[in-house]
Amino acid sequence: LFALHEVDPELSTLISKEWDRQTRSVNLIASENFASPEVFEILGSVLNNKYSEGLPGARYYGGNMFIDDVERLCKQRALAAFDLDPLRWAVNVQPYSGSPANFAVYTALLEPHDRIMGMSLLAGGHLTHGHYTSTRKVSATSVYFESLPYGVDKKTGLIDYEALRETARTFRPRLIIAGASAYPRHIDFEAFREVCNEVGAYLLVDMAHISGLVATGQHPSPFPYADVVTTTTHKTLRGPRGGMIFCRKEFEQKIDNAVFPALQGGPHNATIGALACQLREVASPEFRSYGQQVVANCGALANFLAQEGCKLVTGGTDNHLLLWDLKSEGLSGAKMEKVCEEASIIVNRNTIATDTSPVSPGGVRLGSCAMTTRKVDEKGFERIGAFLLRARDIALDIQKRSGNKKLVTFLDFLHDSSSPERALLLE
Ligand code: PLP
């Protein structure tokens, strides 16, 4: 960042500080990862300069002979990474991210106010799966479409496929979304397909979180069952921030038209180039080992915490994330998140199956994909588990001493430089 430091020292300093934060902390955010130097090189390349509305070979701007090849290569590699037959599957690599990718699918396949069913936000679904609250249609996906979410069993934390089927029979959605932001177990895509067949709905699988695991054989593939599959490209897939939409050939034209011109303008070609490079890596034996290690590491952390008596939603994990129920230990997810942050362990508070409102989530979500990129193994994750237990104990001590359940009071105690817990945390 030498040149930037000369031109814009203010911004350069902020970026350096962020880099320092990222490298010094333990990153357990399940949706984040560390992209490779090659991905960064391409993101900062001349590909950024070009406008290329349209598709390869059919652009609305001149000068796209090389950009066309970049996008074609990206598409080929995307299909290859998921072992898809190009005669039966198509892919659009232009969505700016996961949220626009999902909205493009609804735009392509649905009429305004058609019915959709996705996992509720409280249960671990994503905003773009039709989220609304009792007072507000929060996501545009619930403004423009009629949404009725399905949940998880409050006791087991698992998707209740029978309840899903019952709701679908009554609600008759045009589209059902399988996929989540905070679900620690394998998803049974076949069961979703059966429900879709029964009620005549499309099946959209949003594999944003697990696409790197699907590509490496660590999670059952949605492709035998789904009509359309969306994904982000920056979570377990470890690429630049972006989105992709895979669809059966019969939907290709509708999906392409929904992305452009219905919703987007010019594709972000530097992102598409960087994604092409990452998809090459995804097909490598090294990335296959990475996928295995991500799951092994998350399993090691889950076992460690469970052996120490912690309650995990669903009792454990099959993938790259777990949900730790802190409510059962008398703590809120927000307090745990703040205490961890002081100790440079980055987690996010998350609702758990028994929460009834997203306002004060009862747990934290812990993910293994970023630290696995940094070569932490099972033993390392057990050490991280021990740090987390210490943070939990400190949080409980502060809560006791502050004598108050309120987060603001808790934070006053936490940030008090003379607090004994703070000294412990910084140790
Ligand atoms: N779908 C799922 C399941 C997600 O978890 C996310 C993001 O976390 C998205 C879609 C949206 O992706 P983005 O934040 O890139 O718009």
Image: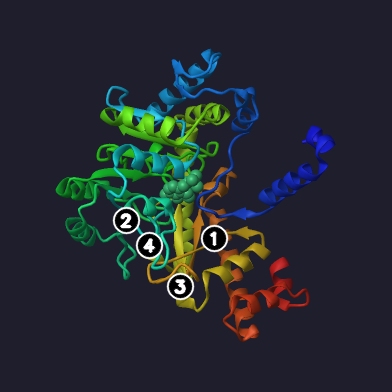
- In the picture of the structure, the residue carrying the numbered disc 2 is 147
Q: Is residue 200 visible?
A: yes
Label 4 neighbour load within 10 Å: few <14, some 14-19, many 20+: many
Which is nearer the eye, 162 or 368? 162
Labels 4 & 2 near each other (Cβ < 8 A): no
Q: Nearer the viewer, mark 3 or mark 1?
A: 1
Checking the image for residue 23, the label placed there is: none
Q: Quadrant of residue 411?
A: bottom right
Labels 3 & 4 near each other (Cβ < 8 A): no
Reading the chain from its start, which is encountered first: label 2 or label 3?
A: 2
Q: Quadrant of residue 3?
A: top right
- In the picture of the structure, the residue carrying the numbered disc 1 is 348
Mark 4 belongs to which amino acid? Ala
Mark 3 belongs to which amino acid? Gly
Mark 1 belongs to which amino acid? Asn
Q: Is residue 371 left or right of residue 170?
A: right
